[in-house]
Image: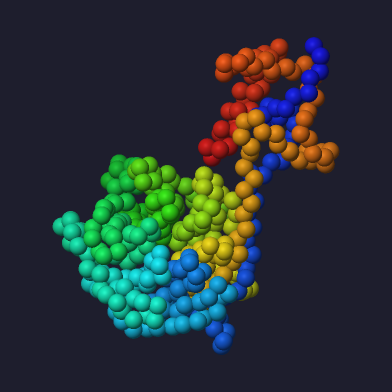
Amino acid sequence: MTSRTLKISLLALLMVLPVNLALAEVTASFRYPLSNFSGPVLSQWARLAVDSERNEIYALHQRKNDIRIFDEHGMEIFVFAEGFGSAADIAIGDDGDIFVLSRGYQSATVHLLDYRGEQVAEIPLQGVPAAFSKFAADHLVHRNSSLYLVDSSSMQVIVVDEAGRFKKSYDLSREIKPYMPREELQRELTINDWRKKKLEDIDLNGFTVDDQGNLFFTVPVLFSAFKLSPRGELRRFGKSGSAKGKFGVVAGIATDDMGYIYVSDRLRSVVLVFDRDLMFQTEFGYRGDLPSNLIVPDDLAIDSLGNVYVGQAANRGVSVFKVVHQDTSPPQAGESMSINHEESGRIIEEVEIDRLEFVVDQGSDTASTDSGDSSRNTEAVESQYNEVNDE
């Protein structure tokens, strides 16, 4: 058989060459803490929201019950502290409207503020089903002209329009039931078993919604983050552990314009980054005293410039990181690709292979070779490739 120069697919190339293929490259670097002219602004687990049109960041300091606005360079430009009761969370509308969630006993109120922080209206919730009579929201998200109110203890979500009219609801505790420990195990646990108490205290911590209407949330007891699509498809991601890419105590969650997902971990003091396919990419922060370190990070927010804002404990305020990701996804079928061959240090686009000839019939999905071993090798490589993706 004659030699033939072939442009081959990724799987066939993996069969004959050791390669190093990176599907995405994500890097994060510390920029600065949010500050005013006196220095870094101290806060404890600030709640964060971004005005995407102006790239301004809003930080709600719950202990001080004030809201501070910072420009895209991290400098404070305005502060206000009246007109919204005991604030629990903050969200920014598409046109810059400020929505503040205040909490009372088994109740919650949404206040609409103008750019000066003065109350324009109190938004009453209308048409909410009676089943939500004890609903006490502690999270607020604005997305696509809707307000998402979340009760983290019951894991219930109410969606209303900007006037407070009920649109729909979610019961996330019901959604995650397939991922709960077996009922047999729960019955076996005694009242004094610490595991029983943990199972009874299941709630969510972080919550956000992307532009496509996907809900993202974290459940610390399950060491997991979840994505719930508008079609009701639930996907779980993340694994428990102390190593890089693993979850300790998951907290805040946010998404950027490219579909990347960011999850803060209180125990490991890092922010983990996942791609749109829920695959781990990198992490940054780590516990320590350097400015670039984090101490028990919690809420997250991301602006359109790629700045990631991280609220944290120990009165460390809000740290700002710059995240850069370059999508180098594999080309589609029929496109050529360049792969770095580590042994030779050169770029290989076409490979001459003796005794290997793919015969592809037009209109057929099958490919044959003159060697049965080659066919079996291709199947083996494809199986390993799928197993790695499944993990």
Q: Residue at x 76, y 40 (%)?
A: 340
Estimate the x, y position of residue 247 in percent, counting from the top left.
Answer: 50, 54
Q: Position of residue 263 (x, y in %)?
A: 49, 58
Report the coloring of the rendering.
Answer: rainbow
Residue 74 percent location from the top left of the image: 56, 75
Q: Say left or right for 297 vs 141.
A: right
Q: Quadrant of residue 345?
A: top right
The residue sitting at the bottom extreme is 38
Is residue 86 visible in the rendered image? The answer is no
Dividing the image into 4 quarters, which one contains the N terminus?
A: top right
| Foreground residue among 244 and 227 | 227
The number of callouts visible is 0
Residue at the front extreme, as displayed: 95
Relative to the observer, which residue lies in front, 391 or 192?
A: 391
Q: Residue at x 30, y 64 (%)?
A: 162
* Of the pair 312 and 209, the residue shown nearer to us: 209
Using residue 6 as the reference point, say whether residue 29 is left or right of it: left
User: At 70% from the left edge and 36% from the top edge, which residue is drawn?
Assistant: 337
- In the picture provided, is 128 more to the left or to the right than 23? left
Does 363 sit above or below residue 154?
A: above
Q: Position of residue 19 (x, y in %)?
A: 73, 37
Side of 20 where 86 appears, left or right? left
Quadrant assignment, res 321: bottom right
**Quadrant in which the C terminus appears:** top right
Q: Is residue 202 visible?
A: yes
Q: Nearer the viewer, residue 266 or 144?
A: 144
Residue at 34% of width from left, 76% of height from top?
113
